[in-house]
Image: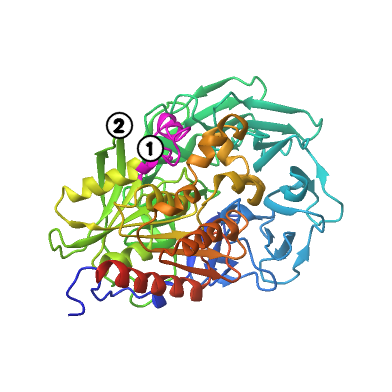
């Protein structure tokens, strides 16, 4: 009978509804403190909106050109305020150039018309500093242009490195950037670099082999920089003196920290603290070294920004039961208020569930953290299981909004999200645990999550399904090819099937991923072959659903299609869908709806009813 089996239960939360939910994020406070700008992403397009600091009805600013809603540098890094709070500079995927628009929506000006993709602008009285990525020439520059775009960009740094995240010093003398030399990989090794705009001198204030130093922000006095370094074994806050280069650790602890931002008076630093995916805002008194939590609501806070009066911190917030929104947090008392919420009838009342944070032992005894979602109504040992594997592969699952997971839970599925070795958030040793073992021990970590959930008496483990995108798509393919007797089906989104060919097909930022994790191909070619899902295509026993965007530069369609063609040739059951206009992740509402409905039909046919 329909609806009797877990996995076929009716869901309150429909794909048609959450596919049309507008997601606000990336808030930025205007220099005069009057406005808050934010990005609003919906149906494949992002735009910049503004709202008065005290709240009210938001106003859309961009229209002729879309704002950055994705891409390799992240949405929040794609726009900035002018010093006089009258204009906003933004990068656009429409040609990759930098534009400037008045906050009333008038006078939309193109500031750059050069080869490359201009990213991450930061505007001071001296002009706009930005990153210009030229992937065809294998170059990433730090460039400076006047605020009116009247002159061609001036290159501030040599092109022997890659650069991200430029920030002016308040006095306009320096620009701090995160840099990493070719062919290093940002997550594993990066430098805090300062450029003297007057003299052109460049200094690495924090560096080191296999040490990642990132996210430098100047103090109001322009003499100190707060940044994040993992040289202690954990990504913690550090402070360096610009002139002397002397650094010291600010908040030593076995928790990862991020996004340090100074209070306007320079006495405090707000930062994010990651505790098993629960990301809270903390305050550090710089002189005394004392810290205190500012937020307590379980979820993920991000994109911190102080108001100029120092009384409030503006940020984005989301949780498994709270859709993305912009909030303000009172610095003195910690009271929080919603500034921008994009409501949609039926979302907040859809019976959303909060996951449980669990730990389990992997095959070699390594402790693994995971998020576990279970339906409100439990039928012991009857629920099918989705092993939801994150991408990166150095990502992390935590307390964030994911309507797709909530949908499957309402359908009666149990969902487990392992933070396998190599995931961020658990220290450098856990991150480095993927090196040399990718496609092998992380596979065991993911399989061990099934054992952990099975011990709770929730699931029918014979109905376990691997599911993931990007690095998680690769992991799904590995699950299906290397552990064919464990999984009843697999759903792989834009996954890597052939590590040997991947470097020739991907974009520049990911080209060195495989060499970093598995070593150079000359010495490790056999390992590259052995860790490629395509090598074991003939071992696949269960049905696979493979989905891909045709405009994905990170993992191009050739990666999915190589495995699809191999399985078809072998007579294996495989369904494939190529989404027109989609890149590395789904953004269009019609794609999200089709993806969920297609996956639902696939799982019903091959897992729930068999």
Q: Residue at x 41, y 26 (%)?
A: 252
Where in the figure is residue 375, as x and y percent of width and height? Answer: 21, 63
User: Dot 2 corresponds to which residue?
Assistant: 364
Asked whether residue 472 appears in the rendered view, the answer is no
Which badge, 2 or 1, comes first in the chain's sequence?
2
Q: Which mark is residue 141?
A: none
Q: Furthest residue to the right?
A: 151
Residue 272 is at least partly visible in this image: yes
From this view, report whether residue 211 is shown above or below residue 12.
Answer: above
CA gap, disc 2 to disc 1?
A: 9 Å
Main structural element of the magenta stretch: helix, strand or loop?
loop
Give SS at disc 1. Answer: helix
Q: Is residue 283 left or right of residue 162?
A: left
Where is residue 293? Give x, y as percent: 35, 41
| Left or right, residue 530 beside residue 445 | right
| Quarter the N terminus occupies | bottom left
Outermost residue to the front: 570
Q: Is residue 507 above or below residue 23?
A: above
Query: Marks 1 and 2: in contact by CB < 8 Å?
Result: yes
x, y percent for residue 463:
25, 60
> Looking at the image, which residue is at 51% across and 52% down?
497
What secondary structure is marked by label 2?
Answer: loop
Determine whether, in the image, residue 236 is placed left or right of residue 10: right
Quadrant location of the C terminus in the rendered image: bottom left
**Most foreground residue, 563 or 399:** 563
Residue range (magenta): 419-443
| Number of other residues with Cα within 10 Å of mark 2, as a class: few under 14, some 14 to 19, many 20 or more | few
Nearest the viewer among 473 and 161 is 473
The answer to which of 243 and 135 lies nearer the viewer is 135
Outermost residue, bottom side = 1
Which numbered marker is on residue 441? Answer: 1
- Seen in the image, is 79 located left or right of residue 36? right
């Amino acid at each position: 009978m329909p609806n009797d089996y877990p996995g076929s239960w009716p869901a309150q939360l429909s794909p048609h509804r959450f596919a049309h939910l507008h997601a606000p994020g990336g808030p930025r406070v205007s220099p005069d403190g009057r406005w808050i700008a934010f990005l609003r992403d919906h149906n494949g397009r992002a735009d910049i909106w503004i709202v008065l600091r005290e709240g009210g009805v938001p106003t859309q600013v961009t229209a002729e050109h879309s704002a950055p809603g994705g891409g390799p540098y992240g949405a929040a890094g794609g726009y900035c305020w002018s010093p006089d709070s009258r204009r906003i500079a933004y990068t656009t995927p429409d040609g990759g150039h930098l534009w400037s628009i008045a906050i009333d929506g008038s006078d939309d000006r193109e500031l750059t018309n050069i080869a490359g993709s201009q990213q991450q602008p930061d505007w001071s009285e001296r002009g706009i500093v930005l990153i210009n990525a030229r992937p065809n020439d294998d170059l990433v520059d730090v460039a400076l242009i006047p605020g009116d775009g009247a002159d061609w960009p001036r290159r501030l740094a040599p092109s022997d490195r890659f650069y991200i995240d430029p920030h002016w010093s308040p006095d306009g003398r320096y620009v701090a950037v995160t840099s990493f030399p070719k062919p290093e990989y940002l997550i594993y090794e990066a430098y805090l670099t300062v450029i003297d705009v007057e003299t052109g001198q460049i200094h690495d204030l924090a560096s080191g082999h296999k040490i990642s130093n990132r996210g430098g922000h100047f103090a109001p006095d322009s003499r100190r920089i707060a940044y994040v370094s993992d040289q202690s074994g954990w990504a913690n806050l550090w402070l360096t003196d610009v002139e002397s280069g002397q650094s010291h650790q600010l908040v030593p602890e076995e928790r990862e920290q991020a996004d340090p931002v100074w209070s306007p008076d320079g006495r405090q630093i707000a930062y994010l603290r990651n505790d098993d995916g629960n990301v809270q805002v903390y305050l550090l008194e710089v002189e005394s070294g004392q810290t205190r939590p500012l937020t307590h609501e379980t979820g993920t806070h991000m994109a911190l920004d102080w108001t100029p009066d120092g009384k409030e911190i503006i940020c984005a917030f989301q949780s498994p039961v709270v859709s993305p929104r912009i909030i303000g947090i009172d610095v003195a008392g910690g009271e929080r208020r919603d500034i921008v919420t994009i409501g949609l009838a039926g979302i907040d009342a859809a019976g959303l569930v909060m996951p449980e944070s669990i730990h389990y032992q992997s095959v070699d005894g390594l402790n693994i953290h995971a998020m576990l979602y279970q339906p409100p109504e439990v039928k012991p040992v009857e629920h099918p299981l989705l092993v939801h594997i994150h991408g990166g592969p150095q990502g992390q699952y935590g307390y964030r909004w994911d309507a797709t997971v909530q949908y499957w839970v309402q359908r009666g599925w149990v969902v487990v999200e392992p933070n396998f070795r190599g995931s961020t958030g658990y220290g450098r040793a856990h991150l480095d645990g993927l090196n040399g073992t990718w496609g092998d021990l992380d596979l065991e970590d993911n399989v061990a999550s099934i054992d952990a959930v099975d011990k709770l008496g929730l699931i029918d483990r014979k109905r376990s399904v691997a599911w993931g995108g990007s690095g998680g798509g690769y992991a799904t393919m590995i699950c299906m090819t290397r552990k064919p007797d464990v999984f009843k089906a697999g759903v792989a989104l834009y996954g890597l099937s052939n590590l040997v060919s991947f470097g020739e097909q991907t974009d520049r930022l990911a080209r060195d991923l495989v060499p970093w994790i598995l070593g150079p191909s000359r010495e490790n070619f056999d390992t590259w072959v052995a860790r490629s899902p395509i090598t074991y295509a003939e071992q696949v026993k269960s049905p696979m659903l493979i989905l891909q965007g045709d405009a994905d530069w990170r993992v191009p369609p050739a990666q999915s299609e190589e495995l699809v063609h191999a399985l078809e040739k072998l007579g294996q059951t495989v369904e494939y869908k190529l989404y027109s206009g989609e890149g590395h992740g789904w953004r269009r509402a019609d794609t999200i709806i089709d993806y969920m409905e297609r996956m639902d039909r696939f799982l019903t046919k091959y897992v729930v009813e068999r």
